[in-house]
Amino acid sequence: ALSHFDLIQAEAILSTASLPAPLDTAFHNILRNLEMYRPYLPDALFAQLHSNYTSSATEVAAPGLTTNQAALVFTDIQGSTATWEACPEGMSEGLKVHNEVMRECLAEHGGYEVKTIGDAFMVAFEKSLQAVQFGLAVQEQLVYAPWPAGLLKLEPCKRM
């Protein structure tokens, strides 16, 4: 996915997004890191993947994906274990809000939910641009989501 990542297009999308300053900074940092590591990762990474998982007649593309190449996105709620301990009822409701936002944005951007483990998602997109657009949309939607009042009282969950 990184070998097909269009940093210029991603930068253009990011420049038109209206994100809170910390999210904007975080996404710019991600793009800079991808730009820095792009020459090193794809060949080694995809050569190994290709040798371990060669194409066969029985391979089936994930629903919504028409090629064997995909951009993968991994998510996780930062500090969720401590938040579960501090406010289990709020976190239970908050996880429902989180998952609903994730799945709505996933559908809007043509993604496929590969799996979830706890509060972590592994999702796939046919194109890297879809993955970047999904990431931006999800972050923005999560900022404005209707979180339980109990969660918003906790330091890691306070609105920016």
Image (cartoon, rainbow, N blue to C red):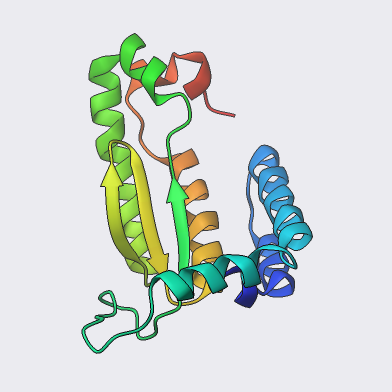
Quarter of the image containing the C terminus?
top right
In which quadrant of the rendered view does residue 47 lie?
bottom right
Q: How many marks?
A: 0
Asked if residue 70 shows in the view, the reply is: no
Image quarter where the N terminus lies is: bottom right
Q: What x and y, as percent, mark residue 158?
A: 51, 22
**Which of the 4 image quarters holds residue 150?**
top left
- Residue 52 at least partly seen: yes
Q: Residue at x 53, y 27 (%)?
A: 159
- At x 61%, y 77%, the residue is 4
Question: Who's the residue at 43% across and 39% down the image?
Answer: 76
Is 138 rendered above or below residue 10? above
Position of residue 70 measured from the top left corner of the image (x, y, whole percent): 45, 73
Looking at the image, residue 17 sits to the left or right of residue 54; the answer is: right
Residue lying furthest bottom in this view?
Answer: 57
Where's residue 71, x and y in %? 48, 68
Give how far across and how far down residue 144 sits, in percent. 46, 41
- Would you say 148 lies left or right of 79 here? left
